[in-house]
Amino acid sequence: LALQGGGWCNSIETCSFRQTTKLGSSRFMEHEVQFFGILSSDPSQNPDFFDWNKVKIRYCDGGSFSGHPDSEFKNGTEFFFRGQVIWEAVMDELLSIGLSNAKKALLSGCSAGGLATLIHCDDFREILPKDANVKCLVDAVCLDGSLPGYHLQKGFGSGSDKWVLHIEGGGWCNSIETCSFRQTTKLGSSRFMEHEVQFFGILSSDPSQNPDFFDWNKVKIRYCDGGSFSGHPDSEFKNGTEFFFRGQVIWEAVMDELLSIGLSNAKKALLSGCSAGGLATLIHCDDFREILPKDANVKCLVDAVCLDGSLPGYHLQKGFGSGSD
C-alpha cells in the first residue's frame, strides 16, 4: 500500500486552493494512474513486489490522513479535515476484499504520505493477522529520519504556467562526526527548518529585482540529506548508525508532488542551485527535462561555480570555549 504525498494546507487560502485540485477533491483525480516504483508489475523494475496486490491510496484531506470531524475547525468555512476517517474507511474496504488474509504487507509513503505512514503504522499492524509479516516504509526522509520539505509561491498572470525551482545549498557531510552534527541543524533535519522563508533573487516576486521570473511559480527545495539529493536506501551505509542518505528519493518525492500541482503543465521551467544545490542541479538536470512536457522550454542553472565550472569549496575548523560564538 502506498500513501500518496502532496504536502499540507495550513491556511484558508491554501486549503481553498487545494479544494480545486486533485489533492483536495476526487472530482479532479484521474480515473486511472500508472503504477511504478514499488507498485510496478514489471519484475525487472520491481523484483520484490511485482506480483503483490498493490494499492495507491489517494490523498485529498490536506492533513496526512489525520483529521477527524470532532476536531474540525468550525468557522463557517467548508473544509472537511477527515483524513483519519478516510484511512479507516479505506482499511475497512481493503480488509473486506483480501487484506484480512495477508501473509505479508508493506505500508509506504513519501512526503505527507510518509507522515501518514508513521501515524498509522501501529494501527496497520494491529488490523492484520497476528502471524502476518508487516512492515512500514517511509522512503523520503532527511538525514535524521524527519520529513523533507519545500516552499512554494504560486505564479500569476502570464507566469502561471512557468516554474523556477531553486535547490538549496549547504555543503556535505562525510564522516560520522559531521553527519551527526548535521542532524541537529536545518541542513539535516526538517525539525529545525523555518516554517516560512523569504524569497529573494530569482525567487523574488518584485519585478524591479527579478524582472524575468517575478510572476512565475517559485519553489525553494530544502536540503537535508547531506549528499546533494543523490543518496538511496539501497546504498545506505549500514553500520548501526541512524543516518538516512535518501536524497534521490527526496528528489523523486518532491518532483512527484510538484507535477501533481501544476509542474506537469509547465511551458517554461528553470532548475537552479548553488554549492551542494548546484551539484544536485547537475545530477538531476536530465531527469528534470525528461519529466516535463516535450514542448516545454527547460533550462538548468548552476549558480556558484569555479572558473572551469567545477564546484567551489571551503575549509572550516569549529571554534570552542569562549570562541564558539
Image (cartoon, helix red, strand yellow):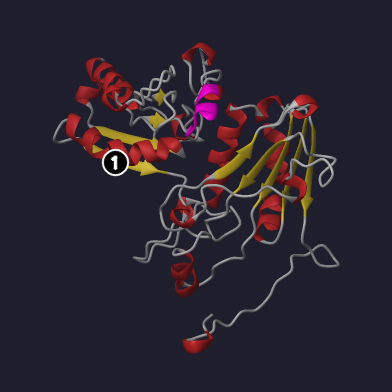
Give the total of numbered labels: 1
Where does the N terminus fall, quadrant-wise? Answer: top left
Task: Tell me where residue 124 sits by quadrant.
Answer: top left
Please state the horizontal and vertical placement of residue 228, each as a whole percent of the image. 61, 57
Tell me what residue is drawn at x 49 percent, y 47 percent: 148
Residue lying at the far bottom in this picture: please name it.
Answer: 322
Please state the horizontal and vertical placement of residue 178, each as a whole percent of the image. 50, 72
Dominant secondary structure (helix, strand or loop) of the stretch shown in magenta: helix
Please state the horizontal and vertical placement of residue 72, each as a whole percent of the image. 33, 25
Task: Tell me where residue 66 sits by quadrant.
Answer: top left
Q: Is residue 112 above or below residue 51?
A: below
Residue 102 vs residue 32, the one in the foreground:
32
Q: Is residue 17 above or below residue 313?
A: above
- Res 34 seen here: no
- Report the side of 2 relative to 283 (left or right): left
Where does the C terminus fall, quadrant-wise? Answer: bottom right
Tell me what residue is drawn at x 74 percent, y 40 percent: 205
Please state the horizontal and vertical placement of residue 165, each as a whole percent of the image. 69, 43
Q: Amino acid at mark 1?
A: Lys
Q: Secondary structure at mark 1?
A: strand
Residue bounds of the magenta highlight:
9-16
Task: Tell me, yes or no, whether the highlighted magenta stretch contains residue 13.
Answer: yes
- Res 206 seen here: yes
Residue behind mark 1 = 135
Task: Tell me where residue 116 sits by quadrant.
Answer: top left
